[in-house]
Image (cartoon, helix red, strand yellow):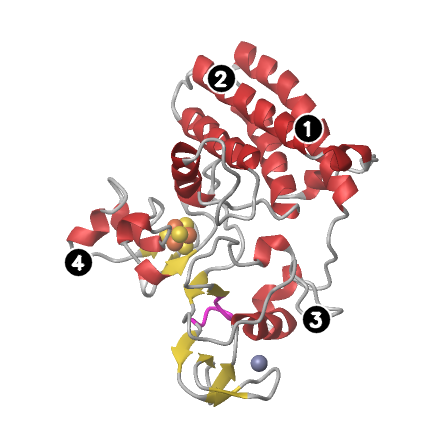
Amino acid sequence: MAVADSDSCGTCEFNAANQGGAGRALHGSVAYTCQVRGTDVDNPFWTYCYNHPRRNPLLVTTPRGPLWAAASPRLRQIPLEGGHLTERLYLPPEAQPPPEGNRYRRVPYFEGVRPLDSDEGRCAVCGEVAERTIALRLPGEGRRCFCSVTHYLQHWLEHAADAEPYRGRRPVPFDIVYGDLLALGEELTHAEAEFASTLDKKPLLELLSGLEGALVQIGQGYMDIAAAEQLLRAAPRANGGDMPVSRHILRAWVQMARVGAALREEPPDRQLVSGALRDVRDALSRFFLAEPDKERRIESGKRWWQFWK
Ligand code: SF4
Ligand SMILES: [Zn+2]
């Protein structure tokens, strides 16, 4: 994987080794310490999380979901249908690996232990012997093997202490999320006007964070923003290509990242923020126009995004 294309810890500005510019770590012997998670990172160019600026348009600095390690592409491939690991076991979107078709899927650390690429072993979930496995070496135990990303995720969700926030969840009904997205789009108009007169970032950031949460819940979240930009430039009229997502949503992500970057400046550029916010709203309304069924099904009183953080 070319480092320049990477959304790994090795290129992340929140990595202490990159202070003074993403990618600086490539040129020296430095400690790879994550300033968001307060931890040293093993294999920084093969480790990932959703706080990386390429997947974090608002540049949030509280940890977002697990820390991920790259998994071998030679594992058994078992589809992860909409987060349903089994009939009863559901993995919510904020704990799912990114949807893009990268050869190297990602698996979460298990209570701080990095899952490793390993050779033949018997899967702890399905009992089958696989030539290549993901292996866990937990303190005081032998090797625990998994035949596939899906079975590793199942085991992690059922047993890891750090998976507790994701256990027992159910998908948020589409009607509710789409209703919230519409309501958030409208509120954005007011927030934009308020920001233009007060320059108060907090209410705007909270609203955008709710918007991001809603996109995550409908499976359109944590896009690689740099990849989305490239895709939009290369084929402005095409759909999501390898990304299972509409180009309107890609645009919304790219524009949200522009807002995030502008709000970081002191003082923020009012016009830049307003222009990008208008683009976010426009992209969302085009998305809804392209999906008429979604609009008809909306019936929302509840705003689950208010407890999304
Ligand atoms: S763990 Fe996340 S925030 Fe920390 S350095 Fe890695 S990608 Fe960046
Ligand atoms: Zn298995």
> Viewed as shown, does residue 303 lie left or right of 257?
right
Residue depth check, mark 3 versus mark 1: number of the one nearer the observer: 1
Q: Amino acid at mark 3?
A: Thr
Q: Quadrant of residue 202?
A: top right
The relative height of residue 46 versus residue 135 in the rendered view (above or below) is above
Residue beneath label 2, please? Answer: 275
Please report contact status of discs 3 and 2: CB closer than 8 Å, yes or no.
Answer: no
Residue 34 visible to the viewer: no
Q: CA distance from mark 2 to mark 1?
A: 21 Å
Residue depth check, mark 4 versus mark 2: number of the one nearer the observer: 2
Please report contact status of discs 4 and 2: CB closer than 8 Å, yes or no.
Answer: no
Q: Amino acid at mark 4?
A: Ser
Q: Earlier in the sequence, mark 4 or mark 2?
A: 4
For the residue pair 134 and 207, the one nearer the viewer reads as 134
Residue beneath label 1, please? Answer: 289
Relative image position of residue 139 (x, y in whole percent):
46, 82
Name the chief secondary structure element in magenta: loop
Residue beneath label 4, please? Answer: 29
* Label of residue 86 in the image: 3
Please report contact status of discs 4 and 3: CB closer than 8 Å, yes or no.
Answer: no
Relative image position of residue 278 (x, y in whole percent):
55, 19
Q: Quadrant of residue 86?
A: bottom right
